[in-house]
Image (cartoon, helix red, strand yellow):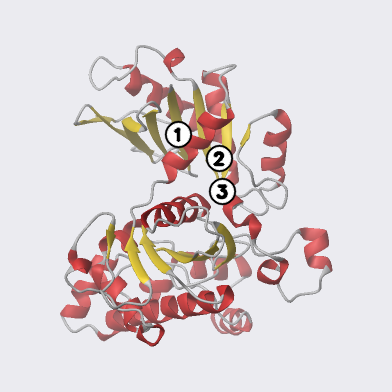
Amino acid sequence: MKILVINAGSSSLKYQLFDMETETVIAKGVCERIGADGSVLTHKACGESFVYEEPMKNHVDAIALVFKALTADKGGVIKDMNEIDAVGHRVLHGGEKLFDSMLVTPEVEAAIEANIPLGPLHNPANLAGIRACRDMMPGKPQVAVFDTGFHHTMPPKAYIYALPYEYYTKHAARRYGFHGTSHRYVSAEAAKLLGRENDPELRIVTCHLGNGSSFAAVKGGKCVDTSMGITPLEGIPMGTRSGSIDPALLEYIMGLENLDIHQMLNVLNKKSGMLGVSGVSSDFRDLWAAKDQGNERAALALDIFCYDGAKLVASYAAAMGGCDAIVFTAGVGENDNRARAGICSYLEFMGIKLDAEKNNTRGTVDLSAPDSKVKILCIPTNEELVIARDTKALI
């Protein structure tokens, strides 16, 4: 069985083609600058990269170019699109009603569209990917896997904001959380590594650290709290996002800088976080290099990140009545040993001890010192495989 996984963004589209008999990636790639000049597809297959510099005015064009790459004489891995059994789509926001992965029907498509106010940048792109595949592969099963889905098990005390309750009942204003497929994957892998699958008492804090970062408290395989909110802006400071701040600060800055709410949100989402504090970059590699050269603001940005991350881990230990394991994943979590060490350094009061030598390795690894009271794991995430597995199960 072959399953194509699509992750459509506003101006990009990532894809992976899986052979589900072995759960291996046959080909993958990314379309960039969709709807703009200089659009390009980079396709990887057969151990090589193939670049297509062709106009892509919309997602239909992008999907058509993906199909061209998958069936090409050079770099192609299938004869035609009939070899693909189904398509799985990452959908950002499922709102209150869409959380389990499901086959795309007209009703599901309408519900995704109804949630555009909750995911104004991503849901339209996700829909465009679904519709483009439907147009190019009529009758082919399509599955929607929701980024917010894993967090649907949170109790009301974790997801209700302390606002007038009718804002929740009338407008679905609540915490939803994101990176759900990642938190789901690595928490399940951690349970396997610990030999505690299906243990209802296993308490894990998963740390998805990248340009966008989120934390989740996972007890017995179910999410009980998470750091992102109704949007991915809440939580820890990130590459360019502010994370949680005093909301009254918006009015203060807007008045002084003569900004409207849309301009202020642009600042919070694209000019804040590591970039805003450091003035250097949102890339952690650049930040560590700047710190090593004596840049105090870069050092401050990194310390804020590690400090706030540690506070979240500790608070989730409190929420679960303890913590058996911490899992680091995603771009920064998997590759930045100094960020991992920085977060763990604030958690020694919990008996958390990192092995410095193990922390310099890559891949799935136990980073704990022998006397650490909490397991520290690094597990590479695989969100696309989660989507492919759910798609296979549903068809």
Q: Are marks 2 and 3 in contact (CB under 8 Å)?
A: yes
Q: Residue 337 lies in what quarter of the image?
A: bottom left
Numbered disc 2: secondary structure: helix
Label 1, label 2: how far apart the Cα atoms are: 12 Å
Q: Name the residue tied to disc 2.
A: 126
Nearer-the-camera pick, 276 or 127: 127
Q: What number is the disc on residue 138?
A: none
* Quarter placement of the N terminus: top left
Amino acid type, mark 1: Val
Image position of 88 with respect to 353: above or below: above
Q: Callout 1: few (<14), some (14-19), or many (20+) C-alpha neighbours within 10 Å? A: many
Give residue 84's position: percent from left, percent from top.
Answer: 45, 20
Q: Along the polypeptide, which appears first: circle 1 or circle 3? A: 1
Quarter location, residue 365: bottom left
Horizontal placement of 10 versus 43: left or right? right
Q: Secondary structure at mark 1?
A: strand
Residue type at mark 2: give it. Answer: Asn
Pointer 1: what residue?
Answer: 5
**What residue is drawn where x is 25% and y is 73%?**
338
Look at label 3 and name its amino acid. Answer: Leu
Indicate which disc, 2 or 3, sits on the residue closer to the N terminus. 3
User: Which quadrant of the rendered structure holds the C terminus?
Assistant: top right
Which numbered disc, 1 or 2, marks the residue closer to the eye?
A: 1
Q: Is residue 295 visible?
A: yes
Residue ID at (17%, 79%): 292
Q: Percent from the top left, x then y, of residue 322?
A: 51, 76
Q: Between residues 123 and 250, which one lies in front from this camera angle?
A: 123
Q: Cβ–Cβ below 8 Å for labels 1 and 3?
A: no
Question: Mark 1 or mark 2: which comes first in sequence?
Answer: 1
Q: Which residue is mark 3?
A: 92
